[in-house]
Image (cartoon, rainbow, N blue to C red):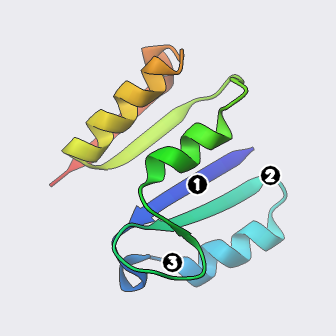
């Protein structure tokens, strides 16, 4: 299974929204979670952290690939490690 938690500020920032939404319908095991932090909409709102924390309430084997601004990635890595995951299972790509 692949769970893509994609956080942005506004809807206009959601890259490939239509394509990823369609991929979720077409590809079994692919799950797309767009999250907006600065705009109300019909989908998930707030920060991505609560979404992935909810996904791993019952800790299961997982590999995490984090990409984004340093502050967000650092916080996500810390939260994932605090959930009990091994740091070898957390991969990072920073920008900004």
**53 or 16, which lies in front?**
53
Element carrying mark 1? strand
The mark that comes first in sequence, 1 or 3, is: 1
Mark 2, residues whose alpha carbon is within 10 Å: few (<14), some, or many (≥20)? few
Residue 45 spot, x, y in % from top left: 49, 67
- Which image quarter: residue 24? bottom right
Which is closer to the viewer, label 1 or label 3? 1
Mark 3, residues whose alpha carbon is within 10 Å: few (<14), some, or many (≥20)? few
Element carrying mark 3? loop
Element carrying mark 2? loop
| 1 and 3 marks in contact (CB < 8 Å) | no
Mark 1, residues whose alpha carbon is within 10 Å: few (<14), some, or many (≥20)? some
Q: Is residue 8 left or right of residue 84?
A: left
Measured Cα–Cα span from mark 1 to mark 2:
11 Å
Residue on which disc 3 sits: 16
Residue 12 spot, x, y in % from top left: 38, 86
Residue on which disc 1 sits: 4
Identify the residue shown where x is 82% and y is 71%: 26
| Quadrant, the N terminus | top right
Q: Is residue 65 above or below residue 32?
A: above
Residue 3 spot, x, y in % from top left: 64, 49
Identify the residue shown where x is 43% and y is 83%: 11
- Which image quarter: residue 91? top left
Residue on which disc 2 sits: 29
């Amino acid at each position: 299974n692949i769970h893509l938690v994609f956080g942005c500020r506004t809807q206009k920032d959601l890259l490939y929204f239509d394509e990823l939404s369609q991929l979720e319908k077409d590809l079994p095991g692919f799950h797309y979670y767009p999250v907006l932090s600065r705009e109300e909409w019909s989908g998930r709102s707030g920060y991505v952290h609560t979404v992935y924390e909810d996904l791993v309430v019952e800790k299961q084997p997982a590999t995490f690939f984090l990409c984004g601004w340093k502050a967000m990635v650092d916080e996500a890595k810390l939260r994932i490690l605090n959930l009990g995951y091994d740091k070898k299972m957390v991969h990072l790509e920073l920008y900004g």
